[in-house]
Every structure is written in C-alpha cells, then in structure tokens.
Image (tube, rainbow, N blue to C red):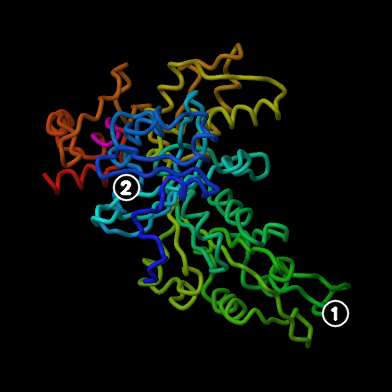
Amino acid sequence: MDKNTPPLEALDVQSAMDLQQHPMVVIDEEYRIVAANRAYRECYGVTAEEVVGRRCHQVSHHSEVPCHQNGEDCPHQTVFRHGEPHEVRHVHYDPSGNAEHVRIRGHVLRDLRGQAYLAEEIIRLPRERNDITCNELRMVGRSPAFLRCLHHIEMAARTDASVLLWGESGVGKELAASALHQFSARSAKPLITVDCTTLPEHLFESEFLGHERGAYTGCIGRKIGLYESADGGTLFLDEVGELPLPVQAKLLRVLETGVFRRLGGSDLLHANVRVIAASNRNLRDMVAERSFREDLYYRLAAITIDLPPLRERREDIPGIARVLLDRIGQEWSGRWQLSAEAERRLCAYNFPGNVRELRNILQKAVALADSPMIRPEHLRFLNMEERPAVETAPHPRPTLVSTRRGRPQDLDELLAHYQGNRRLVAERLGVSERTVYRWLQTS
C-alpha cells in the first residue's frame, strides 16, 4: 500500500452510504438498525435518531416479531446464515402506516474485526407495479405467499428463458403470464394467448403456424398464425398439458428452432418468441405416464413458478374481493361492499375453485343483496355444507411470542388443540405450513 493512501479506518461509512441513490440501512444480527443513509431519511421523513437502535421489523413491518416468523422470505436469515446476497419483494409501511411494495437487496457487510452486518438496499416500486393489471382485473395481495410468487415472476421476467406456471384451476395463471410479459423487455410487443384445450391436431398448423392462399379447399387468403403474431413478444400456452401427443411433437419442432412454414407455403420463416406455458396438471407426472413428451417439458420448464391457491393466502381475500366487486359494479352499474361478518366468512372458506370461485360467489351475492351491503346470508358456497376451513369465532390471531429458535411458545398448545393438524395451526398463526414443520424439526 502507498504510504500516502489513508487507512480503511479513516473512511467514513456514513458518507459512503449517503452516496447511494436508494434508501439503505445497516442491520446487526439482533435485527437492530445501526445506520440509515440520507436517501432513507429523506424518503421516509425520519431522522437517524428515530430509527437507529430500533428493530428493523418494528420500523418496516410494524411487527413485534421478525418477518420470517410470519412466513416471509427474510434477507436477514439468508445473509447471516449463509453470507450470501439475497433479493426479495416485501410490503413495507412508512411512518404514517401507508403500505408500499418494495424490492430489497440484502448484502453482507463486515467491519475490520470481521463482524457481519446486513446492508439492506430498499428499492421502492412505482405504484402502478404494485398491482398487475390484465383486462381490467388485477393480481393483488400482501401475503408472504403472494409476494414470493410475484418476486419470482419479476426475476424470471428479466430473462428470455421459457417459463412454466403451475397452479390449481382459478389461481390466475393468465394474470401471472401477463405480469411476466409486462415486467419483461418485450412488454411493448404482443402477448398472444393460445388456449391449448381448443387446439386439435387437424387445426394446429393452420391456427398456430398460419396458411397461404390455396393451402386447402376453400382457402382464399393468407393467414398469419398465432406463433408468427407473437414475433418479438410473448406466446402464452394456456393449459399446455391438454395438447395431444402429435401436436406436442409439432410444437416442439417450432420452439426448438423458431423456424416454421405456413401451411401450403414453401418459404422458411422465423419468429423471435418468448414462451410461457401454464398447466393445472402435474406435467412431470404426465411425463412419467408418457402422456406428455419429456423433451417438450424440459423445453418449456427452463424456469418453473408455482402459483399459490387462495387458501394459502387468506389475508389477500378481502383485497381481491374488493377488486372483484369494483369490476362487478362497473359491469352492473352499482356499488357493493362486504360487511365485516361476510368478509370473515369468506376468509374462513377453502375456495377449491380459487379466485374464479370467489368471483362467482360475489356475483351471486350481489344478485341476492337488497342493498349495497353484502351480508353473510347472501354468500352461497359451492360446498353445500358451507363448513368454514378455520374457526370463525372472533378470536384474535395469537401474538407470535417466540423462543430463541423462533418457535412460538404456544405451538404445542395449538397442536394439541388442533389434534396435530399442522395446516390448521399454520392458518391460525398466519404462517405457512412449511414454517410450522421447520419449527417442529428444530425443537
């Protein structure tokens, strides 16, 4: 080192942080904020004294427990356990209690003694990217399951790799495909949807690849196919598991090369297409059963994203219901809202048909309601027993008083109450079933 070079100790860490464009905080292993840069203080209208020394989950999440204990993907856990950078999407709250979606980039930062800290960069997302729109419907939510899914969608959108979306019927696979397209560099180009349930073998070449004049009897003009129409943009293959095997082989040939001929044509054509596929069936099981081609599966599933069912994101149901009621109000020239008891009843139902079933239930409720207020008696569930999936008694969700391992102190009591049913315990605590399983493994 040059003798004129100042030692590292002489550098002012706070000044270096203040050069960062995005809000940034430094957090220790005990979740305490030890520094906040100028962008953070200006962005949230706080002084250093108001945040330094407080727990990060108290400041950002307005929670008395770390976010990972509420089932969220926590950068603090990854950075301190593995020393690796981690990026997630979260909902944060400003000092006034207003919620906003943010992307968090967490990095390990070490002092001269080797002590590790979490350097957390906070990227505030524009409001229009908080809710993903598609044909006047929206993907909305703040639950950990939803935010994880949305984060995976955003990360996948940065690439041009093919994406396979899996989820039960009605979870919103078309909305997810629209989000992938909107977040991608192809958003200015077309998003073309192919309903694979209506694409029989004898129409595949004509509909998918197009045709030239005279290609078959009665063909009087050229037709641009669905694949060519998506040139420069995105092709969404909805319910791709329904394609017959012969069609799968033809599809694979086109996707492998991007080269095709229109039916009745002789010229080789090329289209630059990003492919998103979706299915409510397990394609890996179909591969094992030889009802889906293995080579096509690997061509489509470069990136796989699971879309959570509505019963795994119950806290999102009120927000989704409000969006659907707004849409129904636009179509039926009215305004409706849920009573508190009707909202609780919806949140207690399992929704085997997911968001599609929720929309149907709300449409029936609006038709039955004799006022703008929807009450519990207006709700008609497909499950005739109408048995709630969780307790509907007005008991508040228990506070997650945790042990040093993050395990709630009342976990054993809840397991006994629900006769060992981990799913019901997770629903009562507001965490994922996987989190409950992890607590049991580490106890």
How many C-alpha atoms fall within 10 Å of the one at disc 1: few (<14), some, or many (≥20)? some
- Answer with mark 2 or mark 1, whichever residue precedes in sequence: 2
Q: Secondary structure at mark 1?
A: loop
Q: Is 276 located above or below residue 442 in the figure?
A: below
Percent x, y for residue 431?
Answer: 30, 38
Magenta region, main secondary structure: helix
Looking at the rendered image, the disc whose residue lies closer to the viewer, 2 or 1, is 2
- Pointer 2: residues within 10 angstroms few (<14), some, or many (20+)? many
Would you identify the image quadrant in which residue 335 lies?
A: top right
In the rendered image of this protein, does residue 14 appear above or below residue 185? above
Q: Is residue 295 left or right of residue 259?
A: left
Q: Is residue 218 above or below residue 360?
A: below
Q: Nearer the viewer, residue 50 or 320?
A: 50
Cα distance in 3D space between marks 2 and 1: 64 Å
316, above or below 244, in the image: above
Segment tinted magenta in the rendering: 425-429
The circle drawn on residue 76 is 2
- Numbered mark located on residue 157 in the image: none
Whole-percent x and y of residue 315? 41, 32
Position of 27 with respect to 17 (left or right) is left
C-beta proximity under 8 Å, tags 2 and 1: no
